[in-house]
Image (cartoon, coloured by chain):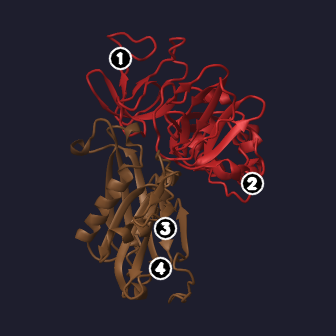
Amino acid sequence: MPSTAAQIMQNVVLPGDPIPSHTGDDTTIKLGPGLTQDQDVITSMKAGVLNHLEGSNRWWVESNQQRVSLQQPIHLQGNRLFPFEKWVEFAGGAELGDGFGQTIVFISHPHQYIPATGESVIGIVCGRLTEGFKVDIGAAQQALLPYLAFEGVTKKSRPNFLVGALVYARLSLANKDMEPELECVNPATGKADGFGELKGGFVFKCSLGLSRRLMDENTPILRFLAEQQIPFEITIGRNGRVWITSGSAKTTIMLANTLQNSEYLNERECREMVRKLMTMQ
Amino acid sequence: MTIRPDRRTEPTQLRPFSSSQNLLNRCDGSAQFQFDKTAVLVSITGPTEVKFRDEKLDRASLEVIVRPLTGLSSTKERVLENVMRSTFANVILTGLHPRTSIQIVAQVMKDDGCVSVGSAAINATTMALLDAGIPMNALVGSVTCMVGKEDGEILMDPTMEELSRARSIHTFAFDSASRTSVMMDENGGKGTSGGVVLYSESTGDFTEDEWWLYKA
């Protein structure tokens, strides 16, 4: 992993830059969002840093959403790489050639959420239609949550959400041409598995990069907060929304502020911030 | 080489330019681009919900709004809006976000009277699109140049004083992606251009041969 500013500068790509193919002839390259193929050339569509993991032939790109100054080494929170498996479901993909799999992934869009199938999001119910709820997930279009996409539902017992209710759901259908669709049930097990209405608590917005990092429970900031032994419950939506609830409103607000402020801090600074907040309690 | 009024020594030397990104926090991307005393701030919002009448089935619709430094917007701003919309429609991959809208708002922050507001706006829009992460197939760079009345000398990025002696003024916008295009001018000379010309606007007296020269 590049750890010095000099190495990072070499891998900065801008829209229109061809990505050099670092592999032999018969390898499969999976293109993630931000990369596009034009005949035989792979070019980048967004601005960011091309990266790869040593010894595993996996390539990905970090974008400018971390906004780290290039005068200091880029470190991913806690010097920990995002678990690669979580990215494989990213929207958009093309395969060329065949053979050993390689994935070049480009993460971008710090603010605007682009729905992708399989991602879990926090939505706000905006209305009721004949076939489901209209839910705002922060994307260009509102999503549809069918009445029957819940565990143990029958035609007689439909869920009854009021307008303004918070829902944690999974995107069952998301592509650029159709309106996104949600479901509150895990397709593999048929059970709710945490999806459904979020009662009480507090939702705040964060950047997409931060919400992605928070989904890993070993992220430094979550580890430090857990060490402080404050009971809290957190739900993270990939659309840049985080729901949090705890014993008192004061604690909830403190936790929300902590998480929002942790975006650009490294592990040491996170630890320092949590320690200071605890002494102020 | 004669020294230009603002102490530049080369005719191809640009004024000091700078840019900063992520200045506004309520939009998806923003950037300010400055050519010395001309500065334009651009904000990008999108891809977001589109009004039904602007909805395009297979691509995002680009909406551009230009606001002048002072006063209400007039036809001059409309012209720049059209220019920017058609330039960036070629560069932004709108096919990836059908039935959405990408809104570009350009606010002139400083204007010293030079014609480089259009160039600054185009450059600022490129930087803002990078900040917003909107997919593009190239970067767009734009610059203004002029040809002097007496000596026919080509000056890049002219100041107000130099413009008073201009025979013709040209604004070009280039894309960054095509690297291998080579331009030939009428006299058989060769010049390597950095990219394809996305936009060109010229006013004044000039011939076709000269235009090819200026483009190179």
Where in the figure is residue B118, as x and y percent of width and height?
38, 68
Where in the figure is residue B20, as x and y percent of width and height?
54, 65
The residue pinned by badge 3 equals B33
**Do the residues at pointers 1 and 3 share their chain?**
no
Q: Circles 1 and 2: CB distance less than 8 Å?
A: no
Local SS, label 1: loop
Label 2 Cα neighbours within 10 Å, binned few <14 / some 14-19 / many ≥20: some
The residue pinned by badge 4 equals B37
Q: Residue at x 26, y 41 (%)?
A: B55
Q: Residue at x 48, y 65 (%)?
A: B189
Local SS, label 4: loop
Label 4 Cα neighbours within 10 Å, binned few <14 / some 14-19 / many ≥20: some
Q: Residue at x 48, y 18 (%)?
A: A185
The answer for which chain carries disc 3 is: B
- Note whether B202 is above or below B129 in the view shown: below
Label 1 Cα neighbours within 10 Å, binned few <14 / some 14-19 / many ≥20: some
The answer for which chain carries disc 4 is: B
Local SS, label 2: helix
Q: Residue at x 76, y 47 (%)?
A: A267
Q: Residue furthest front?
A: B188
- Compute the Cα span from label 2 to label 4: 32 Å
Residue type of the residue flagged with mark 4: Lys
Looking at the rendered image, the quarter that the N terminus of chain A falls into is top right
Numbered label attached to residue A5: 2
| Front position in the image: B180 or A191 | B180
| Front position in the image: A230 or B81 | B81
- Compute the Cα span from label 1 to label 3: 54 Å
